[in-house]
Image: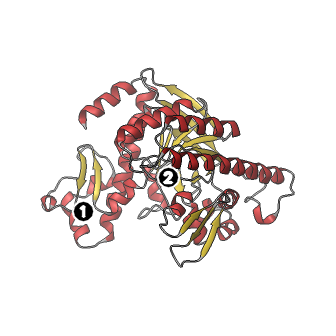
């Protein structure tokens, strides 16, 4: 993987770039729709391509449980399995595992957990998380980290940050061991990536809660270990927006200038615009798709709850300035009817629109950065919110 910065905004920390991966070039800043189990719910891969999706995120935990990473390995990898020839990023599965209230336990060695599907017992070590992701064959894979909820004490945040650092070192060592074995054609078959020229790039994750001294310490350790890119984890877990933005800006400012920066699990269109100004290159969030399935759509006029009775006879599109196929063809009143009738098409049309809205927002952001006008763009958007 290679990353190059093509433009910097003179008035903010925003930058535009290109991320070169084995399955294509990704223009940044970029939003990655979430395809948890190898699918973006309600969307076909053809639709995602028409929308201009550059890179998808899939979830290690869910794919590990079903159909299983070994089945996907035998298929030729996740790209082949799901019919998506473009870049993919996989998370480590740690967030999902640690979100299993009462079903998981964190130890120095890793995370013990029980499946939410059948209660079966499993274990993710840092090495196992990398092994699974190499079998999936994603372009970008993530280290296992420990996430703590907000609010958390400085002692809790420090413990999780220290454990994340130790796990990052183990992840990197295992990754290099397997990569070196592949190069020497002597890797063990049970841990070998898909092919002898498999090129998954490993990202490290910075933790530390909302404490700047812990974030600085985490950055120093993760950067010293050395990764292809760096993620800012542990945010968008309930903290105020001001703290989210401040910690994202503080942490991004400490990370290497010439490598990609990924803010995990964020967020609203407003969050994307604000955090791009703070130097972030990559984002993912379930919000546009999950909200769509529940009848909430993002528009140039703000959020719209399409199930509300006020839209029963509304013949306008979801967003009057949107050019997506949903808005070009269907009315608010019709889409409301679909939701109230329990028709799956309602969620599909809303999902298509929301993904288009997010991707169009990112296109406008990139254009403004390339023109050196992102500061003005952001001021206009803030005024319109």
Q: Residue at x 54, y 33 (%)?
A: 17
- Residue 225 horizontal side relative to residue 365, left or right: right
Left or right: 284 with respect to 126? left
Residue extending farthest bottom: 118
Crowding at label 1, few (<14), some or many (≥20) Cα neighbours within 10 Å? many
Label 2: few (<14), some (14–19) or many (≥20) C-alpha neighbours in 10 Å: many
> Horizontal and vertical percent for residue 169?
70, 47
Callout in the foreground (2, 1): 2
Q: Are marks 2 and 1 in contact (CB under 8 Å)?
A: no
**Residue 201 can be seen in this image:** no
Residue 384 figure quarter: top left
- In the displayed structure, would residue 369 be above or below residue 69? above
Q: Is residue 167 visible?
A: yes
228 or 128: nearer the viewer: 128
Q: Quadrant of residue 300?
A: top left
Identify the residue under disc 2. 148
Badge 2 or badge 1: first in the primary sequence: 2
Element marked by disc 2: loop
Q: Residue furthest top?
A: 10
Q: Is residue 302 left or right of residue 69?
A: left
**Residue at the (23%, 73%) spot, across then down:** 341
Whole-number angstrom distance, CA of label 2 to CA of label 1: 39 Å
Picture quadrant where residue 228 is located: top right
Number of marks present in the image shown: 2
The residue tagged with tag 1: helix, strand or loop? helix
Q: Position of residue 232 (x, y in %)?
A: 53, 42
Residue position marked by numbered label 1 in the rendering:
335
Q: Nearer the viewer, residue 158 or 117?
A: 158
Residue plotted at (23% across, 44% down): 301
**Which quarter of the rendering shows the N terminus?**
top right
Q: Considering the image in quadrants, where does the C terminus appear?
A: top left
């Amino acid at each position: 993987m290679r990353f190059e910065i093509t433009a910097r905004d003179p008035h903010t920390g925003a930058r535009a770039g290109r991320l070169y991966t084995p399955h294509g070039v990704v223009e940044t800043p970029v939003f990655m729709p979430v395809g948890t189990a190898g699918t973006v719910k309600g969307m076909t891969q053809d639709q995602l391509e028409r929308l201009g999706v550059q890179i998808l995120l899939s979830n290690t935990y869910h794919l590990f449980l079903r159909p299983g990473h070994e089945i996907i390995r035998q298929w030729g990898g996740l790209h082949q399995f799901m019919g998506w020839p473009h870049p993919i990023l996989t998370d480590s599965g740690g967030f999902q595992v640690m979100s299993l209230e009462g079903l998981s336990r964190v130890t120095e060695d890793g995370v013990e957990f029980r499946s939410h599907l059948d209660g079966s017992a499993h274990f993710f070590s840092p090495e196992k998380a990398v092994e699974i992701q190499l079998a999936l064959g994603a372009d970008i894979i993530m280290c296992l980290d420990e996430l703590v909820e907000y609010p958390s004490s400085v002692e809790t945040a420090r413990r999780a940050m220290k454990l994340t650092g130790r796990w990052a070192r183990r992840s990197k060592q295992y990754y290099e061991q397997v990569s070196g074995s592949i190069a020497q054609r002597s890797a063990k078959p049970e841990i070998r990536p898909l092919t002898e020229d498999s090129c998954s790039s490993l990202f490290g994750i910075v933790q530390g809660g909302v404490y700047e001294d812990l974030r600085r310490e985490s950055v120093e350790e993760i950067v010293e270990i050395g990764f292809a890119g760096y993620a800012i984890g542990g945010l968008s877990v309930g903290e105020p927006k001001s703290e989210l933005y401040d910690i994202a800006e503080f942490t991004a400012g400490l990370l290497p200038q010439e490598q990609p920066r990924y803010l995990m699990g964020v967020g609203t269109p407003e969050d994307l615009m604000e955090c791009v100004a703070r130097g972030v290159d990559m984002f993912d969030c379930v919000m546009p798709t999950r909200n769509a399935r529940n009848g909430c759509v993002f528009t140039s006029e703000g959020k719209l709850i399409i199930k509300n009775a006020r839209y029963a006879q509304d013949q306008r599109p979801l967003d009057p300035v949107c050019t997506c196929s949903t808005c070009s063809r269907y009315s608010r009143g019709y889409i409301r009817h679909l939701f109230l009738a329990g028709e799956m098409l309602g969620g599909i049309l809303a999902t298509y629109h929301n993904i288009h809205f997010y991707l169009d927002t990112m296109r406008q952001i990139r254009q403004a950065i390339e023109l050196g006008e992102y500061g003005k763009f952001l001021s206009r958007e803030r005024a319109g919110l």
